[in-house]
Image: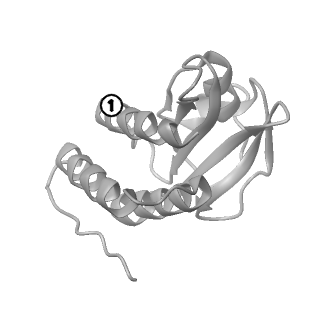
């Protein structure tokens, strides 16, 4: 069955509300986390035209590349390293307007200009990060409080699959 997202709303906030509703309908019967994360990454990239969207999953004390959409990416990221590793260590969203200004930024692609990383917590242990949602833009300062709010809502919902 082919699924298609309908982009609606003029503001980014309206678009997030629309997308989250559609994602919940798309995924409501699926239980496989890899399949779910794959379609979420695809939907976010398709909907907002972000440069790179993907997930890193905590395995063996590292973040390991999971489902993503975009250019080739780093396979593994150490705890506390780069924007993703910092989000994991700090257990909080990292919103970076200019990746060049982030000390220790890991440049998987020189085209990345701004980034937001949102931790995903275990549904069983709310303090344990099990994955991160990583989104890169090829534009400076492309993320704001709306992105933080709605992507946090999305990751809270996704946590129920971990």
Is residue 108 among the parts visible in the rendering? no
Image quarter for residue 23? bottom left
Q: Where does the image place residue 81, in percent across and percent down from the top left?
A: 76, 28
Q: Is residue 95 above or below residue 24?
A: above
- Pick out the residue farthest to the right: 60
Q: How is the image coloured?
A: one colour
* Number of numbered callouts drawn: 1
95 horizontally vs 122: left or right: left
Tell whether 126 sits left or right of 102.
left
Residue that mark 1 sits on: 149
Q: Residue 30: where, in percent of width, then height?
A: 47, 60
The N terminus: image quadrant:
bottom left
Look at 70% across and 30% down and name the residue there: 85
Rendered location of residue 52, percent (x, y)? 55, 57
Residue 122 rendering spot, x and y as whole percentages: 58, 29
> On the rendered structure, is 53 left or right of 151?
right
Disc 1 secondary structure class = helix
Viewer-proximal residue among 41 and 23: 23
Residue in view at x 52 percent, y 55 percent: 31
Question: Of all residues shown, which one is farthest toward the bottom?
Answer: 1
> Residue at 81% across / 44% down in the picture?
76
Image quadrant holding the C terminus, namely top right
Q: Residue at x 37, y 56 (%)?
A: 28
**Residue 2 in sight here:** yes
Q: Tell me: residue 85, above or below residue 23.
A: above
């Amino acid at each position: 069955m082919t699924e298609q997202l309908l982009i609606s709303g003029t503001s980014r906030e309206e678009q997030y509300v629309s997308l989250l509703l559609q994602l919940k309908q798309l995924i409501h019967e699926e239980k496989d986390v890899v399949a779910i994360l794959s379609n979420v990454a695809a939907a976010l990239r398709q909907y907002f035209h972000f440069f790179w969207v993907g997930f890193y999953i905590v395995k063996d004390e590292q973040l390991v590349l999971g489902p993503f959409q975009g250019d080739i990416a780093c396979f593994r990221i150490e705890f506390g390293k780069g924007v993703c590793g910092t989000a994991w260590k700090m257990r909080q969203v990292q919103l970076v307007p200019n990746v060049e200004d982030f000390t220790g930024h890991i440049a998987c692609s020189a085209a990345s200009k701004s980034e937001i990383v949102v931790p995903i917590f275990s549904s069983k242990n709310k303090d344990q990060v099990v994955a991160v949602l990583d989104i890169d833009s090829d534009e400076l300062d492309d993320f704001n409080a709306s992105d933080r709010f709605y992507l946090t809502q999305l990751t809270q919902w996704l946590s129920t699959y971990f």
